Image: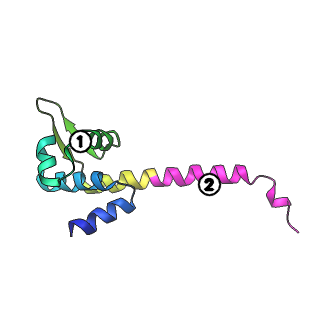
Amino acid sequence: MQTELTGKLQKLGFTENEAKIYIGLLRQGEATAREIHEFTHVPRTKIYSTLNRVSKKKYIEVIEGTPAYFRSIDPEQLLERLRDEFLFSLNETLEELNSAGYGMKNKCC
């Protein structure tokens, strides 16, 4: 099931490691980078860069401290954020396509 869910998140734009971390934190609640490495098997060399990337996307929250703890945002919030990002991207692309195709409407047969 986790592999299937990881694949679904990858279709939504997550890398494999990002998906593993999000799902792992969803199951564990809060965890340190070390604990995340232990239960997700994301390579230790990739943990911090992946946590930083997912944190910047606001898919996880960082609880500052020594050590820092991480937790996933609620799945409904995640899907809302992904939907908003997708719709924004679609609208930008449509505007660019319309700009690129300006004048083509009059170039028909």
Nearer-the-camera pick, 42 or 102:
42
Q: Is residue 107 above or below residue 46?
A: below
Identify the main secondary structure in magenta. Answer: helix
Which secondary structure, mark 1? helix
Camera-side mark, 1 or 2: 1
Nearer-the-camera pick, 73 or 51:
51
Residue segment shown in magenta: 86-109
Which residue is tagged 1? Answer: 45
Q: Is residue 66 above or below residue 41?
A: above
The image's mark for residue 61 is: none
Q: Left or right of 68: which side holds 93?
A: right
- Where residue 48 sits: x, y (%)? 24, 39
Residue type pointed to by label 2: Leu
Q: Is residue 94 magenta?
A: yes
- Where residue 19 sits: x, y (%)? 28, 55
Q: Residue furthest right?
A: 109
Residue at point 34% right, 56% down? 79
Q: Is residue 53 magenta?
A: no
Residue 57 sits in which quadrant? top left
Q: Is residue 109 above or below residue 70?
A: below
Residue 51 sits in which quadrant? top left
N-terminal-most mark, 1 or 2: 1
Nearer-the-camera pick, 89 or 20:
20
Q: Left or right of 19: which side holds 99?
A: right
Q: Is disc 2 surrounded by few (<14), some (14 to 19) or many (20+) residues within 10 Å?
A: few
Evaluate whether residue 85 shows in this view.
yes
Residue at point 43% right, 52% down? 84
| Quarter that holds the N terminus | bottom left
Mark 1 → mark 2, Cα distance in angstroms: 39 Å
Which secondary structure, mark 2? helix
Residue at point 16% right, 47% down? 37
Which residue is tagged 2? Answer: 94
